[in-house]
Each structure stands twice: as structure tokens, then as C-alpha cells.
Image (tube, rainbow, N blue to C red):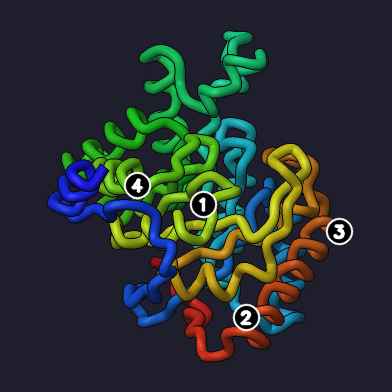
């Protein structure tokens, strides 16, 4: 195996998983190691409740992610969420609507077909996904959750060509199913601004992925029952140490599924989960640096 490992290292990739768990020296542009993200916030009322609760806990929230899809939001809902993000000094990420689970194909709902994740089938779905992004861009949104590598590539090419704003950002979803340094490097090359690997990625795998890329890694600190239901709060300090810069994606255990339609009560429960994770960091890695309020990209 050594020749294979040597070749990987010649490509500036790790030769294997990093079982020595080296400390990452990489940082966000503001010098911070970690930021907080709360996913599954599907509309403005719930987003408003979340931001108010985060203020009550006096914890900086750096990202709010909507997961049901732009095509399921009204124009006014998009406008209001963009407005709330500006007021709350947080980044709003809207999810591309077309995906395998909303397509006319039944494949993704079968035992074998589920392996396709949320990827897109056919060029018309690519066109529709791009239209979803363009619609939200027109209302001021600049960050998007992407589920398909080809879609990511073409969106980035549109950005380079001036067809989309230069300040647009693309977050790759865990539903794309990536979990190794080579895949992470490929996603960075084709335009990813951050990558959410598979939810059960282990620390040594996470550490090796960090060695391969410079962009932030998004990590689920907990999960809905539909994606395992595991809660990893005690691992968070080490996640930060070995994988910085990192977004801690928190509050998922409140939901039953990825596209759970959170209520205002759910939003407050998600904020509580963030406070519990912050407690872990303060107790076990107090020197870790968090981005100040208003740090977005």
C-alpha cells in the first residue's frame, strides 16, 4: 500500500486517515476556529423566533439554513428571511428546491435508489435548480445549499462568467454523501465554499479531510432520527481542534427529518441545543476562538 500512499501524498493529499489527530492551523478569515449554524429553519416566523432566542442566550449565530427548498417559499418569505438575516447579522442559506426526492422518479424511495442522495436527474432539473438560485439572488440571497456536484460546477461557472454575483457562496449538503479527502478536494476545485461531509464521519477521517482542503467544513453535532439520531456534543471540542475552520451544525436532533417543518417552539429548542454545545466548548476547549457577531464569509 505504501506506493499508493506515496502517490496520494505527491498530490498533496493525506496518505491515510489522520489517526494522530493533528491540530489544524487553518482559520476563518477573521482568525476564528469555529462558527455556529442552525439548519432546518423553513420560514421567516421560525427564523425570527430562533434569532430572538439566540440573543437571549447571548450566543453568536453565523448561519441559518433553510432545507425544504426555495421553490416552496413565496417571494415575500424570501424577502423577509433576507431582511431578518441582515438585521441579525447572520448568513442565510437557502436550499435548491429540485432534488431526487421531489422528482417524478421513484428510484430514490427504493432501498437501492436511496444511494443517489438528493442528486438531480436530467438536464431539465439542472435548469430548474439554476432558476431557483436566480430567483433567490434577485431578492438578495447570496448563499445556497447544493445537493448535486454537476449543479455545483455549472453554478460556479456561471459565477465566473458573471451570470451570477461574484459574492455568491455554495455549501455542499451531507445528502451528496461525501466523506473522504479526495472528494472534498474535488468539491473545492469545482466551486464549493464549504462542505458538509457524511454525518457519522470519525475524527481521524475529519482530520485527514482538513489536510486536503482550505474551505470550511460543516459538521453535524447532532442529527434527526431519520439520519441516525446520534448526538456528538462531547466530540465537538476535538472536532474544532482538528478540523478548523468549522461550522458546527446544531439543533438537528429537534427534528424528525432533514426537511422537518420547524415550529417557533422547535426554533427555541434548537437554540437551546446550541447553548449546550457552547457549554461543551467552554468547558473542554475554552481557548477555541469563535467568530464575532456579523462574521459571515
Sequence-wise, which precedes: disc 3 or disc 4? Answer: 4
Read off the residue under disc 4: 184
Pair 1/4: label in front: 4
How many callouts does the rendering have?
4
Q: Are marks 3 and 4 in contact (CB under 8 Å)?
A: no
Q: How crowded is mark 2: few (under 14 residues within 10 Å), some or many (20 or more)?
A: many
Sequence-wise, which precedes: disc 2 or disc 3? Answer: 3
Tell me: residue 160, above or below residue 22. Answer: above
Q: Which mark is residue 144?
A: none
Residue drawn at point x = 25 percent, y = 41 percent:
190
- Report how far apart the C-alphas of labels 2 and 1 lie in the structure: 25 Å
- Name the residue nearer the viewer: 49 or 40: 40
Residue drawn at point x = 46 percent, y = 66 percent:
246
Estimate the x, y position of residue 57 in percent, counting from the top left. 74, 81
Residue drawn at point x = 44 percent, y = 23 percent:
128
Read off the residue under disc 1: 93
- Report how far apart the C-alphas of labels 3 and 4 lie in the structure: 35 Å
Read off the residue under disc 3: 265
- Report how far apart the C-alphas of labels 2 and 3 lie in the structure: 25 Å
Estimate the x, y position of residue 17 in percent, counting from the top left. 39, 54
Q: Does residue 101 appear left or right of residue 96 in this picture?
A: right
Read off the residue under disc 2: 281
Badge 3 element = helix
Sequence-wise, which precedes: disc 1 or disc 3? Answer: 1
Pair 2/3: label in front: 2
Q: Which residue lies furthest to the right in this view?
A: 265
Estimate the x, y position of residue 81 in percent, counting from the top left. 60, 54
Q: Residues within 10 Å of mark 1 (few under 14, many from 20)?
A: many
Amino acid at each position: 500500500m505504501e506506493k499508493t500512499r506515496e502517490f496520494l501524498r505527491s498530490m498533496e493529499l493525506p496518505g491515510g486517515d489522520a489517526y494522530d489527530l493533528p491540530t489544524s492551523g487553518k482559520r476563518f478569515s477573521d482568525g476564528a476556529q469555529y462558527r455556529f449554524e442552525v439548519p432546518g429553519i423553513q420560514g421567516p416566523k421560525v427564523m425570527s423566533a430562533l434569532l430572538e432566542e439566540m440573543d437571549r442566550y447571548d450566543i453568536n449565530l453565523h448561519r441559518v439554513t433553510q432545507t425544504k427548498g426555495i421553490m416552496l417559499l413565496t417571494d415575500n418569505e424570501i424577502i423577509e428571511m433576507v431582511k431578518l438575516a441582515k438585521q441579525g447579522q447572520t448568513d442565510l442559506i437557502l436550499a435548491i428546491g429540485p432534488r431526487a426526492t421531489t422528482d417524478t422518479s421513484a428510484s430514490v424511495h427504493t432501498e437501492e435508489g436511496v444511494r443517489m442522495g438528493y442528486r438531480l436527474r436530467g438536464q431539465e432539473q439542472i435548469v430548474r435548480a439554476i432558476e431557483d438560485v436566480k430567483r433567490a439572488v434577485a431578492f438578495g440571497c447570496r448563499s445556497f445549499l447544493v445537493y448535486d456536484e454537476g449543479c455545483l460546477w455549472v453554478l460556479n461557472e456561471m459565477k465566473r462568467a458573471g451570470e451570477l454575483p461574484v459574492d455568491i457562496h455554495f455549501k455542499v449538503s451531507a445528502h451528496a454523501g461525501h466523506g473522504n479527502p479526495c472528494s472534498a478536494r474535488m468539491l473545492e476545485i469545482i466551486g464549493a465554499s464549504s462542505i458538509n461531509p457524511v454525518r457519522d464521519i470519525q475524527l481521524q477521517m475529519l482530520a485527514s479531510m482538513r489536510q486536503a482542503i482550505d474551505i470550511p467544513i460543516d459538521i453535524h453535532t447532532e442529527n434527526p432520527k431519520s439520519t441516525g439520531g446520534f448526538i456528538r456534543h462531547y466530540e465537538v471540542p476535538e472536532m474544532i481542534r482538528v478540523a478548523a475552520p468549522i461550522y458546527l451544525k446544531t439543533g438537528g436532533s429537534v427534528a424528525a427529518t432533514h426537511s422537518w417543518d420547524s415550529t417557533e417552539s422547535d426554533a427555541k429548542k434548537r437554540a437551546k441545543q446550541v447553548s449546550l454545545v457552547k457549554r461543551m466548548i467552554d468547558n473542554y476547549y475554552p481557548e477555541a476562538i469563535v467568530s464575532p457577531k456579523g462574521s459571515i464569509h
